[in-house]
Amino acid sequence: MAATDAPTAGRESAIGTPTPRRDSEPKVRGTTKYAGDLPVPGLLHARLLLAHDAHALIKSIDTSAALELPGVVAVLTADDLPIVATGPGRPKRPLAREEIVYAGQPVAIAVAESEALAADAIELIDVELEPLEAVVDLEAAVRPGSPKARLHVAAEGEGSDIADAHAAVSAGGIDDEEELSENVLGTARIANGDVGAALAASEVVVRGRFHTPWAYQGYLEPQNATAWFDVDGELVVSTSTQGPFPTRAELMTLFGLPADRLKVRGAPLGGGFGGKMMIVEPLVVGAALVLRRPVRLMMTRSEDFAAANPAGAEILDLELGADRDGRLTGIRSRVLSDRGSTDDFGVESLVAMLSAGPYRWQAHELTGLGVATNRVTFGAYRAPAAPQAAFAVESLIDELAARLGIDPLELRLRNVAIPGDKAVSGQEFKVFGARECLERVGEHPLWARRGSLPDGEGIGVAIGWWPGGYEPAAAVCRLDSDGHLTIVTGAADMTGVETTFAAIAADAFGVSSDQVRVNYADTSSAPYAGMSGGSKITYTVGRAVELAALEAREQLLDVAADELEIAPEDLEIVDGAVQPVGVPAKAMSIAELASKVLTFGSPHRPVEGHGRVSLSPAPQCAAHLSHVRVDRDTGAVTVLGHVIAQDVGRALNPALVTGQMQGGVTQGLGWALLEELAYDEHGQPIAGSFVDYAMPTAGGVPWIDTEVVEVPAPDGPYGAKGVGEAPVVGVPGAVANAIAAATGVRSRRLPMTPERVWRALHENGNG
Amino acid sequence: MAATDAPTAGRESAIGTPTPRRDSEPKVRGTTKYAGDLPVPGLLHARLLLAHDAHALIKSIDTSAALELPGVVAVLTADDLPIVATGPGRPKRPLAREEIVYAGQPVAIAVAESEALAADAIELIDVELEPLEAVVDLEAAVRPGSPKARLHVAAEGEGSDIADAHAAVSAGGIDDEEELSENVLGTARIANGDVGAALAASEVVVRGRFHTPWAYQGYLEPQNATAWFDVDGELVVSTSTQGPFPTRAELMTLFGLPADRLKVRGAPLGGGFGGKMMIVEPLVVGAALVLRRPVRLMMTRSEDFAAANPAGAEILDLELGADRDGRLTGIRSRVLSDRGSTDDFGVESLVAMLSAGPYRWQAHELTGLGVATNRVTFGAYRAPAAPQAAFAVESLIDELAARLGIDPLELRLRNVAIPGDKAVSGQEFKVFGARECLERVGEHPLWARRGSLPDGEGIGVAIGWWPGGYEPAAAVCRLDSDGHLTIVTGAADMTGVETTFAAIAADAFGVSSDQVRVNYADTSSAPYAGMSGGSKITYTVGRAVELAALEAREQLLDVAADELEIAPEDLEIVDGAVQPVGVPAKAMSIAELASKVLTFGSPHRPVEGHGRVSLSPAPQCAAHLSHVRVDRDTGAVTVLGHVIAQDVGRALNPALVTGQMQGGVTQGLGWALLEELAYDEHGQPIAGSFVDYAMPTAGGVPWIDTEVVEVPAPDGPYGAKGVGEAPVVGVPGAVANAIAAATGVRSRRLPMTPERVWRALHENGNG
């Protein structure tokens, strides 16, 4: 079942064994040092002036009073930053120039000897504005004649790396004649077959409009970065980023710097979930380049709420049908994606594709529209656009099942994609465990209880999938002079990859995990690793680690073969030593061999394996059962239990995998019931702290039953797939279906707050 | 002729083209940042208490007064340092314990908020001593009954890595019955054949006793290192070291630290010449471990003179013969090597081997004795022990020639080793350009002038050789997102290797040098490179760079093959682009290809070549002509001109190679005429600054004519050999032979100062 059968003589394999994360204890103890903890000599501190208005022209910015404050080093505005790149994208305009396009937009950055001084300086900046009408109604914004969300700012952008970074899809534009306002920045249509005919020939057709909110990633560590010049004049950026290498590449382009004058140094992340990439780096790098002094910017929580890059709202219209045997026929969708002020994140093809769910359709016509509004920039958040899409399509699949009188799980089993099927994107599902996941939840005792629940309770089923990302990756596995292995990686330090890499290398090499260290190197010397996004680090970098360790193992056996004068194929690694197969008396410890390699006059070559990969994506999925109780008097929904069965390919470390599944479900419950980054009608954000923004907390999360399904990915390390994004996707749909099962009424707007559920129950409409 | 025929279409090869060193301009401008320039937050400064006596027992050390000084953080003595390793070697005893064995020995280290405060603290330390007799006469020290240079300190050590690091030799001990004192720490004898018989059958036998002094490496940057704890608790050592990896390995052993808790960060060296390795690191690391705070120790110049690790004095007795045809017969040598206080540098086999010169002998019996005295620790200095040996043997070869009436160059040509011969160590000279070097100086116009010189002038010839070191090495060649290559190396930043590595990678890959960057990475992420010693970095790491670049080139051609849909073997790299052979219209720039690799969703693997090598040593040599004028009234020797013909294998960068040749000759002239680290009869160092210690200066160095001889080394990059050490070796012998040619009188004591030459002339003895 494993992609590689590595020797494990005399040693329990590190693969498949639940192992605590190496970074857990320091995090729990509070001793982990994050990017913002790095001491830097002569550090200056920055604070941002954020716009109050959602839409306005900038007439003037007067920084003179701020600059008079002792201890204030500089107040910089857009024109001061030495950005040389042009075109769309927030990194190229980290400060507003001419026009403010959302409330919270950074307008100026004050740099001072202390954070408090910088904050004082911000108060003294005088900005003269000419207010403009704010575009905040997503549906109205697309209509011809809508006010423009931007007057001056370039409005068009191609699909960018950021969208690509999470899923590979491609689609054409819309070719019919719908008239759209200039606020529509991008369109995508994915179509095949005659949907009209397919729906007309259907036994049942259901349709619905679904609303999903802006949602905040909720990482505990706010966005922050620090930039300074190293002793040799090289610019160093220490940042809480999900991608040191992509950050370096973007900063190089942005400021016209060659690779050897800019080094990005990652740090342990205090959460990211897709949002930690190039929000603050352009500001600190720009300021450091101007001032030639070290600058740190640490967003406050309210700044992070107002000015980072949460998930955007969507309005999803779906119409789909099935024949009398419960075979899905056609699907038509039209998804409005609120891009806020984002002009370079072409997410339309992704929202269009995901709206079809992981099902076989006879015909489909899927449309995505990316719409500029006067809201914050849109960013990636754990499986971007997928929970929203699954909420819609899984709700309607459930309705189809009800109308057809087919068990909703059975209906999904009949239609869900299996290996060999093609997704609507045209990409083949080479391996895909959706059916196995559905079967697994179907076998769960909770599902058997659905007919015998008390009044007001219900169990919903849903499935969520994620196409999976891919990116070239490399890793080095080096034997150090003390006989331990060091994995050198350029990946970000998040989600426990260190623990997983160590296990992979240990198993591939044939030692125990505690013999393996992981070094997160900076971009100047690390092997390439892409952004930690798209659930691909374990899949791609992990595979590179495996290959590097296997190569290092061969190299060590060659050394031992010379020393022991025996052919390498007659050697084995047992208990930290190399020995002729079955002859422990002739064993040489790896430490002893290492000491014979890394020394003057050694005839051996250094033991340094180097793995390089480029893998095809391995789509992931998870099926869910959610068991809820709905209080008809208050509309309050209590999740009594939740089951997730996820295809993880191979659970390299079951403790981490189930942790990801539980975390994903928990965030999904936030989507379902709690979270909304609300704006008022003027585009003013209403939630600016965790007091205003409700997220799941430990006390409110039910027991989550995790069922690990293993349908191996042929390319992944030991068959593993990414596990980070899939578990969140199906949760809102499962909860919605549970609410419907409990009450007979459907909620079509996330989050399904008590008020909305109560209204749905009492207005008997589609809340 | 090159070991590798790399493609160079459309581009002048970077190999063989004189190119300025990349580090020259910042060094000339004074902007280079050395290890001591690194800003470290919260840095503490250390100063050393050095012993005044050359030999004494420590009765007590009272640090209380020093500790009362405000700003003094700690005063540490030997017992305070958390060293866990035992056995011989200065690193294990960086501070004197119980016994002081040389004047200048560090006894205590004071750590304070400033260097001045630390220096004040040193003055307040009260050390109570019981004086002992100092052993300073090298010859007397070996006699039975000599006072002991050490009473308490362990005195025996095996041959260590430090000796091995410069040349690979092995030899047995002395098996005859000579009675020796306990001060003789190590003995070596290399013998073959019946020397007595060979000498007895000789036509001519000559013999002589030669004295060579202690000599200081004379690097401009004093020894210094800084240690601190990184944000994650890892100990970082920033140091002016010739070997980051060996330093890490030694520090790990010394303090019992695992590889991932200790990172050594190299820095541009302000000279090293063999001396920069583990002199100050144990002190700063020990202090930092005790104090958990950053500590820097920067030796003053006088401390560096007194307490570092210069070359030791030698007394060489040689006897050798030739038959009437000028064929060398037998050689017998006995070399006393003054180890000073060094107990772990088993240099005896090296001094024994080198005393035979690069000649074929019918029989040899070569003896080396390593002798403890009450002097500073002995260290490596550019071709350790070789200039001294060549001074002796080349002087006597010249005498043989005179006695036989054979041209001295001709005598050497008849006897010098050629490929296929074996050195006295038993190692075969696989490739060796000594004959070619001699022929080249023989063809030089200066040699033709030797019969027609004015009175008081003379031209001497000599040859010097160096067996060459080897050590495993690795390097990475990475294609960055901007289309440039980065070489990642763990080598020290000295002798212009950056420029050479860039040229090698550029040529192997097929781009110009300015497309290649070199990153000196720290030990946590760098590929392995050994100490910069033994003239092997260009030879070994350079070869790894070449292999890495060739591999990266293949990887890039694979990428281009996919993109252009053409077989990789039909592609070429021209002008920074990959194109189908001869079809520039279809070229894709390397930058464009790079952008297609290092991005999300790319189907290509990262372009990262990784070269790993272990090479056999390639012996090096240089022949010299020195043209001097001797003033009979004063004994002053003026070098009027000097010719060096050196076998460099292949001159990768002729500008750097000839620079090494000129530098080596210059240091050789210092050995010949100027330099002596003198001690008085109580073991007190007399020279403590550049005022007292005469080194060659620009005004006093003659024009040096460099003749590059290229006898390719099959394993080296493009046939290159090491070039650093060979050029110094033959200089003192050539100058001595020139003085003899000018005056008929031989000086047998280095340096050949005016006083010594005058005495030799007027006493008509052997100076």
Image: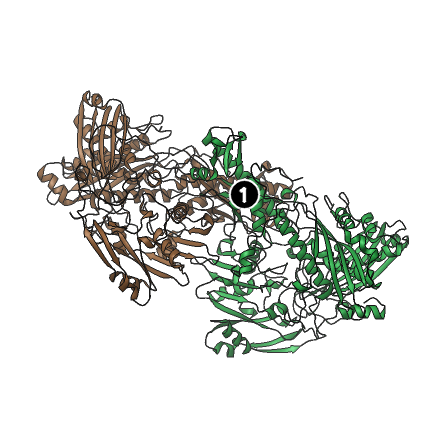
Chain colours: A brown, B green
What is the chain letter for disc 1?
A: B
For residue A48, side relative to residue A131 (left or right): right
In the picture, residue A141 is in which quadrant?
top left
**In the image, residue B457 lies at what x, y percent?**
80, 61
| Amino acid at circle 1 | Ser
**In the image, residue A404 lies at what x, y percent?**
18, 25
- Which of the two residues, B286 or B616, is positioned nearer the viewer here? B616
Extreme residue toward the left, this view? A763
For residue B612, side relative to residue A736 (left or right): right
Q: Which residue appears at 40% of the width and 54% of the height?
A: A238
Q: Quadrant of the N terminus of chain A?
A: top left
For residue B699, side relative to residue A121 (left or right): right
- Which of the two residues, B224 or A251, is positioned nearer the viewer here? A251
According to the picture, the residue beneath numbered tag 1 turns out to be B512
Q: Which residue appears at 75% of the width and 43% of the height?
A: B419
Dot 1: element = loop
Picture mark count: 1
**In the image, residue B193 lies at what x, y percent?**
83, 50
Whether residue B96 is visible: no
**In the image, residue A673 lies at what x, y percent?**
20, 44
Whether residue B410 is visible: yes
- Which of the two residues, B376 or B577, is positioned nearer the viewer here? B577
Sort mark 1 into few (<14), some (14-19) or many (20+) by Cα contacts within 10 Å: many
Q: Quadrant of the C terminus of chain A?
A: top left
